[in-house]
């Protein structure tokens, strides 16, 4: 099947649709990759098990530093955790729990209470 037979829905003029894009910015993937599949999640929850002590210590220190900074936050697999002033897609610190287990631990983010859809992954083919 050649390109003319495929059904694509491309954004026509990106600058008209998204006028706040940085002037003069170029898209390094333009005409090189085409998104073929996306994985979306509605109110996803995340659980990450860390078995390495150094990694767990670094993660714990980072989260505690951001919590104590007052307005800080972290982005874990595309989910913003922290201060609610960061935007609609941010879940509060109360949604994040960390439990030590052995030499590592488990970090869990509860599902957000908003009605947003999250992009969890994308698959593209080279054109």
Image (cartoon, rainbow, N blue to C red):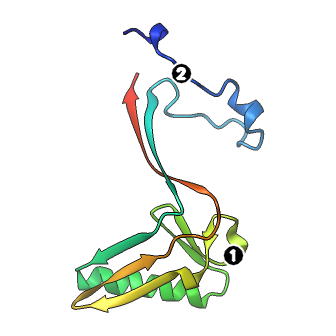
Residue contact between numbered discs 1 and 2, judged by CB atoms under 8 Å: no
Q: Quadrant of the N terminus?
A: top left
Apparent side of residue 99 relative to residue 30 in the rendered image (left or right): left
According to the image, label 2 marks what residue?
8
* Residue under the point 37% across and 83% down: 58
Identify which residue is drawn at 30% across, 79% down: 55
Relative to 28, does residue 40 appear above or below in the rendering? below
Q: Residues within 10 Å of mark 2 (few under 14, many from 20)?
A: few
Q: How many marks?
A: 2
Percent of width and height locating residue 54? 27, 84
Marker disc for residue 125: none
Q: Earlier in the sequence, mark 1 or mark 2?
A: 2
Residue 67 rendering spot, x and y as whole percentages:
57, 87
Image quadrant of residue 88?
bottom right
Mark 1, Cα crowd under 10 Å, few <14 / some 14-19 / many 20+, is some
Dividing the picture into quadrants, the one containing residue 66 is bottom right
Q: Tag 1's secondary structure?
A: helix
Q: Image height check: is 32 above or below 56?
A: above
Residue drawn at (22%, 91%), measured in percent from left and top?
Answer: 102
Q: Is residue 116 above or below residue 102?
A: above
Q: Secondary structure at mark 2?
A: loop
Is 26 placed left or right of 98 in the picture?
right
- Residue 50 percent location from the top left of the image: 28, 78
Q: Which residue is mark 1?
A: 84
Residue 78 image offset from top left, x and y in percent: 50, 61
Quadrant for the C terminus in the image: top left
How far is mark 1 from mark 2, CA to CA?
Answer: 37 Å
Query: Going by the image, does 101 lie left or right of 39?
Result: left
């Amino acid at each position: 099947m050649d390109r003319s037979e495929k059904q694509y829905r491309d954004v026509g003029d990106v600058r008209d649709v998204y006028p706040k894009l940085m002037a003069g910015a170029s898209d390094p993937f333009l005409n090189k990759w085409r998104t073929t599949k996306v994985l979306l999640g509605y109110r996803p929850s995340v659980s990450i098990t860390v078995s390495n002590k150094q990694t767990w210590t670094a993660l714990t220190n980072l989260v505690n530093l951001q919590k104590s900074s007052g307005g800080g936050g972290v982005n874990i697999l595309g989910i913003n955790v922290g201060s609610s002033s960061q935007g609609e897609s941010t879940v509060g610190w109360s949604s994040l729990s960390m439990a030590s287990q052995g030499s590592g631990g488990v970090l869990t983010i509860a599902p957000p209470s908003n009605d947003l859809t999250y992009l969890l992954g994308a698959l593209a083919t080279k054109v």
